[in-house]
Image (tube, rainbow, N blue to C red):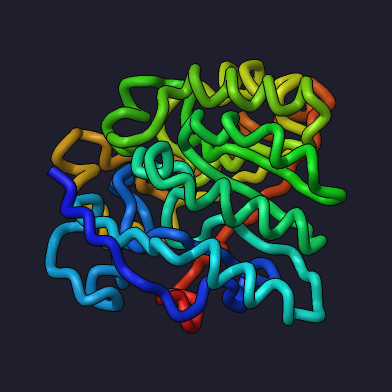
Amino acid sequence: MVKVTEVVAKSILNKCKIYDYCVNAYTGCQVGCRYCYARLFMPRYSGHSEPWGTFVDVKVNAVDVLARQAARTRKKGIVWVSSVCDAYQPLEEKYRLTRGCLEVLAANGFPVSVQSKSALLGRDLDVFKRFADVEAGFTVTTDDERIARLFEPGASSVAERLSALAALKSNGIRTFAFVGPMLPGDPESLAAALQGKADRILIDRMNYDDTIRAFYARHNLGYALEPAFFEHTARRLVRALRARGMEYEVVWGHKTDGPPPGSD
């Protein structure tokens, strides 16, 4: 059961460490990924005591606030949708706040990078086509559906994500896949599954080993937190991507260590 609270936000378009700006129409995330960095600080930052994945604050005025901010923002830098939640978590089907925010960003000439683990992202293909500069992608951490369900309980299946990714690319949208953190699976199979669907692949390891070690141990996956696992898996994946002529980047060691300023 997820505790859903409708709230009023003060700011939606906020500065970001990775891109120029970020937009988060929700605080909290139903996807509830076991490895999510946001679970380390968002309960405290948001004032929630519930475990990560069991609360979501819906910023019901997000579209209106963004429209005001976007109109007065001179620098049309890249906007990341979203940085501390999944923009297409199940509640988005009802509230449509991400869609509304994208419409505002498109109308105001902002370039956008959209990332999700939900096939619902494909719903907004018509909005993506309004942008002069947009890329859309999915986090795909493994080819193994069982592992994906274990670590990403509220996400779409791997097959659904790949199907949505293919549909975006076939419609002329620039696409990417974020393989991070790499989870147990078959790297060669993953590379084959991504071929023709993602214009570029980003690869990262687990950056918060200590916070999730007990979870790995409980499922007899402790070996997959060792540096040797990441190094070996990355080598295999890179080799497979190279063999297929696919563009990739290893973003080893990247961390996000806190919430974006003003992301209330």
Q: Is residue 175 shown left or right of residue 109?
A: left
| Residue 38 found in image quarter | bottom left
Horizontal and vertical percent position of residue 36: 37, 54
Q: Which quadrant of the figure has residue 40?
A: bottom left
163, 40: nearer the viewer: 163
Residue 184 relative to residue 55: left or right: right
Q: Is residue 216 visible?
A: yes
Q: Is residue 258 visible?
A: no
Return the x and y of residue 194 as percentages of the image width and height. 66, 23
Q: Is residue 2 above or below residue 5?
A: above
Quadrant location of the N terminus in the rendered image: top left
Q: Is residue 138 above or below residue 98?
A: above
Q: Residue at x 67, y 41 (%)?
A: 136
Q: Residue at x 64, y 27 (%)?
A: 165
Q: Residue at x 81, y 80 (%)?
A: 74
Query: Residue sitting at 63 percent across and 68 percent down?
Result: 67
| Residue 72 placement, left or right of 228 | right
Residue 162 picture location, percent across and down: 58, 22
